[in-house]
Amino acid sequence: MADNEEERNRHLDRETLLYAVQRRITCERTGRALDVDSAVMVTAIKDGRRTATVLTGEAWDEVAEHVRAKLAEIGATVKVIDGRQLT
């Protein structure tokens, strides 16, 4: 399946994103259909709680800076799985 740790993590990230895309189907911001190759899953983590959002890559590009700043402001961390970087 994977020759090294990096490949293994990329495979797991892609499977996680695929699952999220299959469950969500459309972008939470634009309403457009999601494609695992261009979708982005953003997970906010604070005090052990996680909240995930799935967007098109274009929608994430539009809001990324603002979202990252807001999450940093409240002391949350962000994990981003970007399908555009997994292909």
Image (spheres, helix red, strand yellow):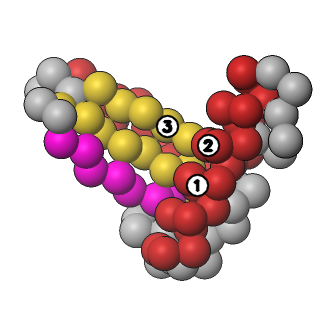
N-terminal-most mark, 3 or 1: 1
Report which residue position mark 2 lands on. 13
Magenta residues, start to end: 49-55
Horizontal side of 59 relative to 70 (left or right) equals right
Q: Badge 1 is on which residue?
A: 17
Query: Mark 3 packing: few (<14 Cα in 10 Å), some, or many (20+)?
Result: some
- Of pointers 3 and 2, the one earlier in the residue sequence: 2
Residue drawn at x 37%, y 43% as measured from the top left: 43
Kind of residue at disc 3: Val
x and y percent of residue 27 in the render?
49, 69
Which amino acid does the dot numbered 1 rest on? Leu
Residue occupied by mark 3:
80
In terms of depth relative to the viewer, which is nearer, 30 or 23? 23
State the residue in front, 41 or 5.
5
User: Which numbered mark, 3 or 2, is in the foreground of this view?
Assistant: 2
Query: In percent of the image, x 56 and y 65: which residue is there?
Result: 19
Distance between the Cα atoms at labels 3 and 1? 10 Å
